[in-house]
Image: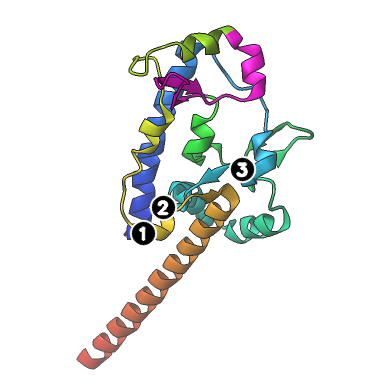
Amino acid sequence: MNSRLRNLALDVEITLKKIAAETTSFSETSNISCLKGCSACCHNSDNVWATPLEMLPMAFDIFDRGLAGKYLDRITSEPNRCTAHEDHGGRYGRCMEYKHRPSICRLFGSSVRLKHNPRGETVPEGLFCNWQRDHFKKEIEQIENLPVDHKDLCVAGHLSNQFNISFSKNLEVEMPINKSLQKALEMIMQNEHYIEMQMQVQHKDSEVHQSTKI
């Protein structure tokens, strides 16, 4: 039987898949992509923030594979690099937990945010890195000239607001991605330990009950 925390992780995974569908569609329509293998953001993880809530699917997968201790050790030994990042040298590498990455990793480079220009008008601003702005100048200019309600825009704030699942305030506070993963893992380990203890108590109670019937 799934615990409440596991069921919450399943709900989060559904939301992440919806975000993935939107960002993929945006990237295909705009023809704007990330540099293959780039991991510049992963080497500066203190500037990449997420909530422990979004990290639950990744954390449960890590826990179920028996890697929770290994990941917690990495967070301690390499706090500035995303613990899910596998370094291939320089700015290149890959995400070892790409399937379960949080919304910031899906939205940055593949969406826009809304801001006010000097005239007080609300306009889209692409969430793109310097490399993308150098290589996709024309495409980004076209995107940022679209009206804010245009069907081709993928607005980060609108997608992030889909995380309206209420469970614990401790899970909804944004923090650096490594700290979010650490908090999610620690909560899962505590929760799973509690469930195991409850099952042991129930098993003992059942044995006592059976013995009294003999």
Query: Label 2: few (<14), some or many (≥20) within 10 Å?
Result: some
Q: In this rendering, would 104 be left or right of 133?
A: left
Magenta-drawn segment: 110-137
Q: Quadrant of the C terminus?
A: bottom left
Are discs 2 and 1 less than 8 Å apart at CB?
yes
- Asked if residue 183 lies in the magenta stretch, the reply is no
> Label 1: which residue?
168
> Label 2: which residue?
172
Residue type at the position of mark 1: Ser
Q: Secondary structure at mark 2?
A: loop
Q: Secondary structure at mark 1?
A: loop
Q: Nearer the viewer, residue 29 or 17?
A: 29
Residue type at the position of mark 3: Asn
Decide: is 49 above or below 79.
above
Question: In terms of sequence position, does the residue under pointer 3 or pointer 1 come before the other?
Answer: 3
Q: In this rendering, would 33 be left or right of 173?
A: right
